[in-house]
Image (cartoon, grey):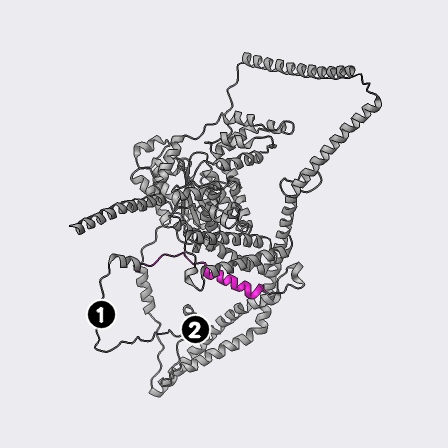
Amino acid sequence: MANLTYDILWREAMLGLLDQMEAENPEDPALAPKTFGEWACAYVKYVQVFKKLERAYDQTVHPQKRLDMRGALEACMGRMLEVKHWLVKLNRGLDFPSLDDVLVDMKLTPDVLELPCPAYFREERAKELEDRNKFLAALADKYTVSGLAEPGPLPELAPLPEEEAIILIQANERGRQARERAQTMRTFKRQRQLEDKRARSGVVLTQEKAAIKIQAGVRGLLTRRHVHRTAQEELQFIGMKPKVAVAGELDPQALQQLTVLRRKDIQKQRLGEYEEAVVTLKSKVRDAEGQAMRETVQDKINAWFLENRDPETGEYPDFPDDTDAGSKVILNPPLPPQTPAPAAAGKKGAKKAPEKPKGKGEAVQEKKEETVSSVFVSDLEAAVKVFVEKWQDHPEGANALAQKHEAELVRQELRPLVFEEVRLQVDEEMRVLLQNLKDMVEAERAAKSGKKGKAKKGKKGKKAKKGKEAKGKGKKKKDPTADRSLESLYAELVSNGIIRPCPARPLQDYLGTVNLLGSVLQAQGLIPDPSCAQMRQVLTQYCIYPLASHYCHLKAPLIRSVLLYGAPNTGKTSLCQAVADAAGANFFDLSPRNTDAKYPGKAVALMIHMVFKVAKVMAPSVIYIDEIEKVFVSDKKRSKEFGGTEAFNRIKKEMVKEMKGLGLEEQVLLIGCSAAPQMCVKKDEKAFTGFFDKHIYLPLPDYASRLAIWPGVIQRHGGEIDAKFDISTLAHISDGYSSGTIDQVVRSMITPRRLGRMPATNLSIAEALQWLCRAEPTSKDLLEALQIWTAKTPARAALLQTDEPAAAGKGKKGGKDEGKAKSKKK
């Protein structure tokens, strides 16, 4: 696409941001969004703006535009997360609000809510990631460490005995020969019937008539082919059918990918030119305007010296320290604090009216109403202001095609930087000058009094204070690996299989669609299971964005630990790998079975310390723990049933301690996976649920999702299906099977040998059912247990607690009213 396309996208996004900010802060506060529906509309609009900004930033080549787009993109991302968390609060704490009715009102499709993973998360760290992957691959080869094991194909059936196999082959061969003979006899019989019919009619078929019939048949065939080809071209033209690939022609998607790569190369070239221009123009600005800046600062500081000099003693004021911004206080003095005018006190003898005691109702009314967080609003306003002032009416001129940097804009950006450097230099000079002036005043005063001026002693108060503060602080925890390098720690963790290579796994590989009946179910008082599309959105917002963007991690609501729980083979581990891959994070495997027999005894504390130390230094990092429910089981008898040489809960104490010690700036995310969270009971259940910030349930795919999963998985494994393949029936029959089981069935069905026969014989539903019958569906008892445990999670438990008192309150209220009525009758 042309440069103008992305400029228009940027302009539309910024105007959309401006409209949304005005809608959230109208002149009349009563018009501000308050209800769930109003904030849901705001969230959808932020998602639309974010997708436009992400696309424009990814393909714009102008370096200065990209810098300003980046600020708007990250601010919009953060605001979108803020609104999402507020929506969750308005949705009674449930992480999956249903927005299908809002999309219908806005006349939008569910695809609008699909969130992209910005490419700059990995592109800006491309060199770092490449070096890290090379180092990890070398260590993995050295210590023979592999990634997480993928589930294999379904087990093959037991081989038949030789006699039964011969009998089966003979039966099949006899059947084949019988079908061939029947086809031959059918053709011969049809030919005899035609000859008999011609003989009875008495019509002699001459060569001319035969030629006419052949021509009519051929013309009919050609006409039918032409009509079919025209219909297919029409369907391709209106986008109802993909274009057939022609040998020698590039696919439109491949052409688009080549265009994207070409623009990426231009981006790097323009960025290099811009960085060189910054260095060159900065020296030019310093040479041309530096002296004038210096004189301006010196004049203002000299004037400040004279204005603040004591007229009686002649002493000069102290120069502001760097901690107090230095001469910035002099150049831009802060405004004096405005003291409110005293209210009319009335008559002197008047007494204040005694305050009435506040009742419970009044105390509740005075409680401050909770509102949506607005941490990113100021950054959004600044981004919109920069766009309006700098780019909205900026003429492109001859630079519209080349999209190179604007030299004058670079000078405007560099002037404040040069001025700051000059100001710091002048501050040092003026401090020396001020000290000399103070020494002269002291010498004159000493000469008049006949005493020698004594040199001022250094200030000891601050040092003493610092010493006391240092004593007051607690001792830092001793680092047992302080004498080791980061490379040695990393290599040791790789050798023990704790740091693993993370495969390239896009989040979009988690196939599935939206549940379009979510709002209807919620209106009836039901809580629907999250859909696969909602799962992708939530993991992107809770895990990928805060983990990959340091800016969002610092300001957005903090999420340090996430629990993914659900039936086996629902994609929990694959989603963890997708999060780490999208964020470019290190992947640590602290699963109990993986760490079993490693770092035995008290050495487990060293292992946990090493993992978190390397994860913090090499952030972003994902710490993955499978079967995490077994880490929180404290019953020794049950722990022995898990197997292993040591107890699985041995990492719990140190892990909890390290998680509590994580700072705000440390981009470390712990993701636990569990297929049996109900294993934790009583106090273990409380500790287990309280450890995680978010609890995300992965249900089995519904019918709509299975309609997308079957063809997607078949295509992923190299298979092809035609219009005769009954996907709807297969989706109905596969109810109760997890997405991982469906993938396992397709992997078993599409073998290399079957791929070789694919052009001649397409896949059939009978063939899929043959393999599906060998897989076991998910147990209904397990699904019921997971549903019961879901009701115990903090959000659901709080929801039940609020519903029960409301129902009980109605009964109590009725009882009181009846009592009052009886007393009145008496």
Residue 330 visible, this angle: yes
Disc 1 marks a residue whose amino acid type is Ala
**2 and 1 marks in contact (CB < 8 Å):** no
Instruction: Name which residue lies at 74% across and 33% down.
Output: 223
Q: Position of residue 737 (x, y in %)?
A: 47, 31
Residue 769 x, y percent position in the rendering: 53, 26
Which residue shows up at 55% across the image and 36% down it?
712
Q: Is residue 619 visible?
A: no
| Front position in the image: 588 or 468 | 588
The stretch in magenta equals: 366-392
Report if residue 369 lies within the magenta region: yes
Q: Amino acid at mark 2?
A: Val
Q: Is residue 697 above or below residue 35?
A: above
Front residue of 401 and 418: 401
Secondary structure of the residue carrying numbered label 2: helix
Residue wearing tag 1: 353
Crowdedness near tag 1: few (<14), some (14–19) or many (≥20) residues, C-alpha within 10 Å: few
Residue 387 in the image: x percent, y percent? 55, 63
Q: CA distance from mark 2 to mark 1?
A: 46 Å
- Could you tell whether 490 is left or right of 192 in the image? left
What is the number of callouts on the image? Answer: 2
Residue 475: quadrant of the picture: bottom left
Q: Give the residue at mark 2.
A: 329
